[in-house]
Image: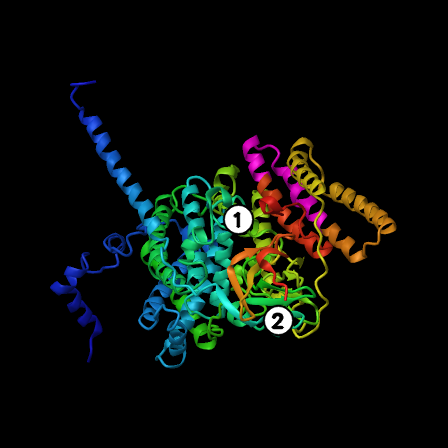
Amino acid sequence: MLDLDEISKKVYETQVWRSIFRHSPWKDAPRDRMRHIVDNIWLHLHPARIRPRAVKVSYSWGLGGISFMLYLILTVTGVLLMFYYRPTVELAYQDMKDLEFVVTLGKFLRNAHRWSAHAMVLIVILHMVRVFLTGAYKKPREFNWGIGVLLLTITLFLSFTGYLLPWDQLAIWAVTVGTNMAGATPFMGNEGPFSGLLGMRVNNDVRFVLLGGTTVGASTLIRFYVLHCVLVPLVAGALMIVHFWRVRKDSFSAAPLEADEEKLDVWPHLIVREYLAAALTILAIFLWSVLQNAPLEELANATVTPNPSKAPWYFVGLQELLVYFDPWIAGVIIPNVIIVGLVAMPFIDVNPKGVGYYSLRERPLANTMFLSGIFLWFLLIFIGYFCRGPNWGWYWPWESWLAHKPLPPPTWDLPAWAGASLMIFYMAFGMAAPRLIGGEISWSRAIGAFVALFLLAVGGLKIFTALAAAKLLMLGFFIFIFFLLGFLFPQRYLKGLDLARYALTMSLILMMLGVLLKIGLRLGFDIKYVLSLPQFNFNI
Amino acid sequence: MPGEPITRRNFLWVGWSALATFFAASAAASARFLFPNVLYEPSQKFNAGRAKDYPVGVSTRWTKLQRVWIVRNEKGIYALWARCTHLGCTPNWFNDQGRFRCPCHGSNFSPEGDVIAGPAPKALWRCKVELASTGDLIIDKAVLEDRPGFREGHVYFVDV
């Protein structure tokens, strides 16, 4: 009979085994559990013991760990794919076809790589939402939140550099659009505002460095290959080390902290959850990769753009945003404001409450504004993904793309004086009103007054102008959102803040709502730009 | 002061500053390294065939190969670069609607290249056109103009 216990006991006692694993024979005593963590290079990033609240799945949902697991899957599948893939214009697409039809498991590995990348973007976003909602970015974790925001942008940049590599139509046109956004950067891009000051041309600007030429071509492919396979993963790895180390050093945020809490041994209580999450992640990715093939479009063609040409879901929101503003505003300024605003969040949100648990009541302003921003971003994704058809025309999700649509109506700009006054009024009124109006406005009275005023205004507009009812409703909806989020919430929860923080928070809120209002003005009233100053490419 | 011995502290200051300068210069040199000096890209100039062969209207004959539309109006011929001025996709010509429409963000342009709808901030670029002695059109996509008043004349238009 095979006595497994006897065999393992013998193995554990051999000199070879003892040389690999430093700790003494396993006895499952608290001391052994602790040694198992601290004596192991891979596990020692964990503390040896941990508060029970921190291992609760319903607190963290394991999202950070799952992101890391996806990064590992991406590394393994990516390295394997590199054995077959040659990053040249002549061979890249052919190698993709070989991976799909000739190489054993090639199709599966490519699927797994693509789907893990999509899943990683989603999970990293959800991880950020979780951290925000539980106030886990507050002191002393401000720095690590900033690292996390950088890791989110790096995750997106890894996806962006990765999808040029198949050298199909999606690849070349997504990267053409993406790098042209870089070409619209103020000062540093040849099509951006003030490009003349630094003498930017098509062959010396920031876009030129990214592409290694003036169009997406052979040198772009090798550049993106190096970025995707070597440089960016190294940076991501380095930042992850800092991120994990700070999670450990700053301690877990989970609250409430109880006096003389009985701590749990990390081995096995936390480790088993981590392994389980990792196993489930692998299972999900493998299943999805068996069932669903990664898309591969036609061979890249630098002159013909597919109609419509859509970015992957996580960039299609940005693509839709580009419809409403000048490229340097939608493609450079807004994303940078979002990133900087997120990094600055722990320094402008001084509310000490709500660390380590979910609470809308204790953090009404922060959570409402953050969720509104996330909702707006996913609304843009929804419009871009489901409501746009050929020629980027508006097609409802249930409409066929073959249906004939009327031509897009001509758009118009407000005169510069009107646009400038409107924007100054918007910012000045938006900034001042919530702070200057004292006292506590009751929700019901405020909303009642708003509805009454709105009905009066609608009545007047209906009588004196030819606006359709649907447009009036739309107008009312957008003004109501502004009234609620841009006035009532800040009036109630923000006005006590010191002036600098108040101004910063309020301008972030006004910018976010401004984007929504501009979308409404374009879709409902065909206003191309509220303020257009062509000499500065200032089109907003 | 002359003759004063160099202190250990000052010596180290100089040393470490020199090292920091070296690293900064290396970073700058590496950045310069990323700007290629030679490009292996196709020529921007091409022969579009006999000018007389183009009827009045927008010709899409060269869009797939050269990314250029050749347009003839009552007076003569000009060439539009088929690159959307918004973010660089190739718009499509719709003959029945009489306009160019971009598949990426929905910009619409008239046959003159002016923006009718969508986000594009500027009119389409017109390319330099020349009439060779053989009667062939020579198009140069490296020489571009989009300002009304300038784009209709000079080298951006041939009278044939």
In this rendering, would A164 be left or right of B148? left
**How far apart, in angstroms, are the residues tagged by discs 1 and 2?**
31 Å
Badge 1 is on which residue?
A192
User: Circle 1 marks a residue in which chain?
Assistant: A
Q: Position of residue A418 (x, y in %)?
A: 72, 41
Q: Is residue B119 visible?
A: yes
Q: Secondary structure beneath disc 2?
A: strand
Residue at 65% from the left image edge and 33% from the top image edge: A435
Q: Which residues are magenta?
A: A478-506
For the N terminus of chain A, the image quarter is bottom left
Q: Is residue A161 magenta?
A: no
Tell me where residue A74 sits by quadrant: bottom left
Badge 2 is on which residue?
B59
Q: Position of residue A37 (x, y in %)?
A: 27, 54
Tell me where residue A277 sits by quadrant: bottom left
Q: Are dots 1 and 2 on a single chain?
A: no
Q: Position of residue B122 (x, y in %)?
A: 61, 54
In this rendering, would A335 be left or right of A526? left
